Image: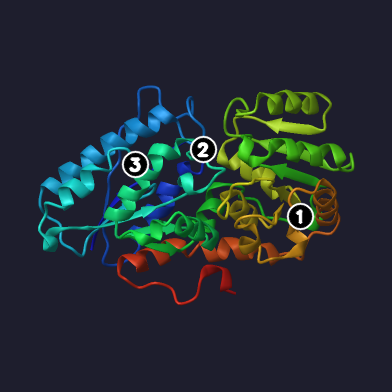
Amino acid sequence: MKVYYLPLEAYRERYTECLTGWTCARFRGRPGIDLTVVNGVLMPGGGTIKSGAVLDAHGRSYWSTTQVAALVSELYKGECTSDDVIYLDDMFTPGYAALPYILSQTPRRERPRLFARNHAQCVDPDDFTFKMRRWMRSYEHMVYQSANSVICASSVHKEAMEVAMLDMCRAEIEVLGLPYDSAAVRQRGWLAPVVPASQRPHKVIYSSRFDAEKQPHFFMDIVESSDPSIEFVLCTGSDTVRSSLPSALERLAALEKSKRITVHRGCTKPDYYAHLASSRVQLNTARQDYVSYTALEASTFGTSTLAPAFRSFPEALRNNDQHLFVPWSISDAVAKLANLVAEPPPSGEDGWLARVHDLTLDRIIGAFAGELPSTPWWELV
């Protein structure tokens, strides 16, 4: 089976810096897969997020269109069969329309199958694409009408797609989890022995973006309402903290000046993992997360996640009341946080989330072969 893999461009401040490596290693390690990585071209001066929210608006478009052009060159060789696969790391891939246009004019026996990962898109009212929904929904329908499968991380996300009637299109919606590799994360990151959370400082780490959908003001409400003995740190891979809310940046500056929050800017992955491995709790206040890479990384280092009982968090955290607070109750969040800081769960209990998502890429490979898991990831032991 040939697999043409179109990865996202790498950003130091986003998980995309690691995702390509995890995926390539797993695909190349599977017998019977002939992997071709189809890269795009970075914009001159690219590789950082300067415009847009989650990915750089110009950089994403430049990378994707050059990437699709490179894939078209591969398809032009005429060496594909219907057993082969095109796998897109992100279903929003500018230039995508070229693929169904070409494949519709390719004999069926020579036509590779299309698989695309949906990270959020405008079915989520908290995603940055929601404001683009008047045209973005048409793009999404094009993908769902032309792809064989759209892969997502959580059942909550699939339900949102079904509400949008995208399940009435051609593509199957498969809930397979987030691609992850905890062993690679440990190897790349904090290499010292991970001490039990009960032996760590009373430190809480916040590692989400500071944009509106991540509820930065609610996070700072928790900081201001918590015992001053708890140390709060914020990590970002950027040289400056960016936000769609100027008021949040002003408030953060005041809290940093008063030493209620310590901000670590320009963090490399090893830097961030060192902070994570020395924290007792990773605090997430997001409205928008389908599972969460920050929760997977916290699980890897035995750090408890505390998150709102909202969207996919109950599924990802196994409905454990200890790790879920009432949205958006400051008093409940502060109380739950204080309990987790004072009495972390037994060592090893928080590793489950990373373990089950370590298998996501294997589940994706199985989907390429038409072999879907009989047990959803959230029911795995």
Residue 342 shown left or right of residue 250 in the figure = right
| Relative image position of residue 256 (x, y in whole percent) | 77, 27
Seen as rendered, the residue at the extreme bottom is 374
Q: In the rendered image, which residue does mark 3 sit on? A: 93
Q: In the rendered image, which residue does mark 1 sit on? A: 326
Q: Considering the image in quadrants, where does the C terminus appear?
A: bottom right
Quadrant of residue 270 within the rendered picture: top right
Q: In the rendered image, which residue does mark 2 sit on? A: 128
| Relative image position of residue 298 (x, y in whole percent) | 64, 53
Quadrant of residue 58 within the rendered picture: top left
Mark 3 residue element:
loop
- Residue depicted at x 39% and y 72%: 372
Q: Nearer the viewer, mark 3 or mark 1?
A: 1
Q: Earlier in the sequence, mark 2 or mark 1?
A: 2
Residue 342 shown left or right of residue 327 in the figure = right
Q: Earlier in the sequence, mark 3 or mark 1?
A: 3
The vertical placement of 213 against 87, above or below, is above
The residue carrying pointer 2 sits among few (fewer than 14), some (14 to 19) or many (20 or more) residues within 10 Å by Cα, namely some
Q: CA distance from mark 2 to mark 3?
A: 16 Å
The residue carrying pointer 3 sits among few (fewer than 14), some (14 to 19) or many (20 or more) residues within 10 Å by Cα, namely many
- Residue depicted at x 82% and y 29%: 259
The answer to whether the residues at label 2 and label 1 have Cβ atoms under 8 Å apart is: no
Q: CA distance from mark 2 to mark 1?
A: 24 Å
Nearest the camera: 36 or 97?
A: 97
Q: Amino acid at mark 2?
A: Phe
Residue 235 shown left or right of residue 333 in the figure = left
Mark 1 residue element:
loop
The residue carrying pointer 1 sits among few (fewer than 14), some (14 to 19) or many (20 or more) residues within 10 Å by Cα, namely some
| Relative image position of residue 315 (x, y in whole percent) | 61, 63
Residue 318, labelled with which disc?
A: none
Residue 374 visible within the image: yes
